[in-house]
Image: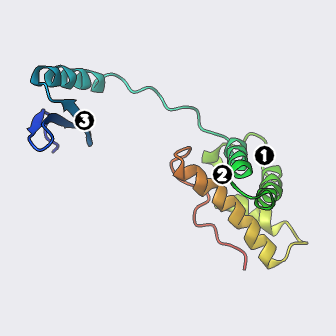
Amino acid sequence: MPRTPKPWFRADRQSYFVTIEGTRHNLGSDQEEAERQFHELMARRSQPVIPAAAEPTVAEILDAFLEWCEKHREPRTYEFYLEHLQSFLDSLESGILVAALKPFHVVRWSDSRDTWGANRKRGAITAVLRAFNWATKLGMIDRSPVAGTEKAG
């Protein structure tokens, strides 16, 4: 059972601290001010949490990734991602949410490209996986919905 939070003085830092729900807060060196901040933090803790933003669509995630690629990668790399991600997006129903996306969507799309060889299919699947891994790292989504998708090979 977790301990009840209460401030403590840390001599090496000459400051008061408190840990609330796993987050350590520096309350400063003045004891009265530290007590006031502690009570303020505890009061905020009991307030209802604001609901998370609406679940993003697949198109929003892919567009954000492409914008990032355009700014931070070579033009040829951006064009590679643009071609494959647009093709993937075109294969999905309009407005599909990230939460509804499954690995079978990626496999079905890749398998439907009869003119692509194994290497191109593998690269295309990698492009989709990369976009969702990027979104996960940035905190746009909690986890990639297509993690673990088998690549053609």
Disc assigned to residue 93: 1
In the shown orientation, is residue 57 left or right of residue 26?
right
The numbered mark, 1 or 3, whose residue comes first in the sequence reads 3
In the shown orientation, is residue 102 left or right of residue 17?
right
Identity, as a three-letter code, of the amino acid under mark 1: Glu
Nearer the observer, disc 1 or disc 3?
A: 3
Q: Is residue 39 above or below residue 73?
A: above
Q: Nearer the viewer, residue 99 or 72?
A: 72
Dot 3: within a 10 Å radius of its alpha carbon, few (fewer than 14), some, or many (20 or more) residues?
A: some
* CA distance for labels 2 and 3: 38 Å
Q: Nearer the viewer, residue 144 or 96?
A: 144
The reply to whether residue 56 is in sight is yes
The numbered mark, 2 or 3, whose residue comes first in the sequence reads 3
Identity, as a three-letter code, of the amino acid under mark 3: His
Dot 2: within a 10 Å radius of its alpha carbon, few (fewer than 14), some, or many (20 or more) residues?
A: some
Residue 107, position in %: x, y? 73, 65
The coloring applied to the image is rainbow
* CA distance for labels 2 and 1: 10 Å
Residue at the image position 72 percent from the left and 75 percent from the top:
152
Disc assigned to residue 101: 2
The N terminus is located in which quarter?
A: top left
In the shown orientation, is residue 144 left or right of residue 46?
right
Please count the marks in the image.
3
Residue 106, position in %: x, y? 72, 61
Q: Are marks 2 and 3 in contact (CB under 8 Å)?
A: no
* CA distance for labels 1 and 3: 46 Å
Nearer the observer, disc 2 or disc 3?
A: 3
Secondary structure beneath label 2: loop
Residue 28, position in %: x, y? 19, 29
Residue at the image position 57 percent from the left and 55 percent from the top:
144
Reading the image, the residue beneath label 3 is 25
Q: Is residue 42 above or below residue 15?
A: above
